[in-house]
Amino acid sequence: NAGVMQNPRHLVRRRGQEARLRCSPMKGHSHVYWYRQLPEEGLKFMVYLQKENIIDESGMPKERFSAEFPKEGPSILRIQQVVRGDSAAYFCASSLDRSTDTQYFGPGTRLTVL
Amino acid sequence: GIQVEQSPPDLILQEGANSTLRCNFSDSVNNLQWFHQNPWGQLINLFYIPSGTKQNGRLSATTVATERYSLLYISSSQTTDSGVYFCAVRTNAGNMLTFGGGTRLMVKP
């Protein structure tokens, strides 16, 4: 029973490039959440998705960031034209349902922007 | 939005000692989770505990929802307990977990 999978685990990009982060939820989970952790800080919510729908993107920057969770395949967090301030750990979590269920976290993707 | 405060921010223990970590939150919640982030950055689920008391080995947690706080107890600490402990909550109306600032624990041999 595999947990939440994220890849790549480490990603290095130069300023102006695009970063694509992937998340496969636990088997049977249809709710996916993305969080960002800046160095020496706690995690901050970015976006909540169900299959083919963005439910809440209140924590996502308005520009350069987008997320999707297609009918088939992993959820993708895309960051266009990366800047040094985007360097952070990006965590994905999944849950069986929304209301009160436990969120299980993946190992994270550590993005470094040179 | 909801405020989550954890104390103490930093804690140094000698191996074998016991400790209590606290999490205060400012609104009613329907989800409260405790996590351990190990030195490699991985987030490990410790407890899902919106109310009541749970125990798992040397760790136990208690949430008093009516008074808006939760406690994490670590007994007979080991060096592998080192890392950052996060409390995270979700309100009835919210979709996301809101994390506290964490307690950074170092256990010395």
Image (tube, rainbow, N blue to C red):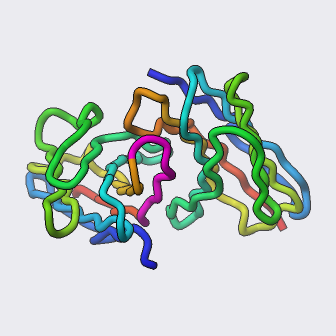
Q: Is residue A58 left or right of residue B70?
A: left
| In magenta stretch: residue A105 | yes
Residue A68 horizontal/vertical position (percent): 15, 53
Position of the C terminus of chain B, as image quadrant, is bottom right
| In magenta stretch: residue A31 | no
Residue shown at 70%/42% (left/top)?
A: B10
- Which segment did they paint magenta? A98-107
Residue shown at 14%/60% (left/top)?
A: A70
Q: Is residue A77 left or right of residue B70?
A: left
Residue A97 horizontal/vertical position (percent): 39, 50
Q: Nearer the viewer, residue A89 or A73?
A: A73
User: Quarter of the image holding residue A56?
Assistant: top left
* Relative height, residue B32 to residue B76 (above, below): above
Magenta region, main secondary structure: loop
Residue shown at 41%/55% (left/top)?
A: A95
Residue shown at 64%/53% (left/top)?
A: B47
